Image (cartoon, rainbow, N blue to C red):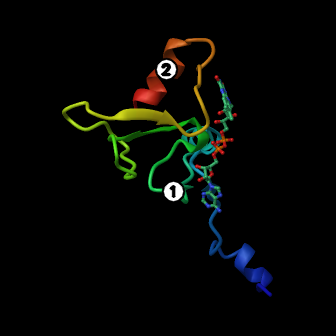
């Protein structure tokens, strides 16, 4: 059991758990660190690339473009097309 003094001495740190869209937004808005279990952020709203006859997932397309893109959660349409919001994805 934790000593309650830890809550007052600053040893505990607030974090955001999960780097999907929700966690990334929470981290961006709060400035708190985001911890993600996977190699890349995005959660179900992210993509990966596979070359033909390969099972190695790539997070970026190969330079020759010879790969298929898959969506982890299926196809997504980011509603609204609000330009400042879209700029966050590019950051
Ligand atoms: C098929 C489909 C289509 C959709 N289409 C649209 C659409 O067109 N437009 C739209 O706006 N929304 C769409 N949505 C909804 C949208 O994808 C979700 O609401 C949104 O992506 C959820 O984000 P999230 O961060 O809450 O969860 P998630 O994306 O599930 O992210 C959770 C993250 O937490 C991580 N995590 C989990 N446990 C831990 C742990 N213990 N430690 C560290 N990290 C952890 C996971 O690895 C993951 O990255 C769609 C959803 C689906 C399934």
Residue under label 2, please give it.
86
Above or below, 24 against 9 in this view is above
> In terms of image quadrants, where is residue 16?
bottom right
Residue 55 numbered mark, or none: none
Q: Is mark 1 within 8 Å of ligand 1?
A: yes
Q: How many marks?
A: 2
Q: Circle 1 sits in a helix, a strand or a loop, which is it?
A: loop
Q: Position of residue 67 (x, y in %)?
A: 32, 35
Tell me which residue sits at (48%, 35%) in the image: 70
Q: Position of residue 84 (x, y in %)?
A: 50, 17
Residue under label 1, please give it.
38
Disc 2 residue crowd, few under 14, some 14–19, many 20+, Cα 10 Å: few
**Distance between mark 1 and mark 2 Cα atoms:** 23 Å
Q: Which residue is most to the left?
A: 64
Tell me which residue sits at (55%, 60%) in the image: 37
Q: Circle 2 sits in a helix, a strand or a loop, which is it?
A: helix
Above or below, 20 against 77 in this view is below
The front one of 34 and 10 is: 34
The front one of 83 and 29 is: 83
Q: Position of residue 12 (x, y in %)?
A: 65, 71
Dividing the image into four equal quarters, which quarter contains ligand 1?
A: top right
The quarter of the rendered structure image containing the N terminus is bottom right
> Between disc 1 and disc 2, whose residue precedes?
1
The quarter of the rendered structure image containing the C terminus is top left
């Amino acid at each position: 059991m934790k000593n309650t003094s830890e809550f007052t001495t600053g040893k505990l740190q607030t974090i955001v758990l999960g780097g999907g869209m929700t966690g990334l937004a929470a981290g961006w808005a709060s400035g708190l660190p985001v911890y993600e279990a996977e190699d890349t952020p995005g959660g179900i709203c992210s993509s990966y690339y596979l070359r033909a006859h390969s099972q190695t997932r790539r997070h970026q397309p190969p330079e020759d473009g010879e790969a298929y893109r898959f969506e982890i959660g299926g196809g997504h349409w980011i509603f609204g097309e609000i330009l400042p919001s879209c700029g966050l994805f590019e950051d």
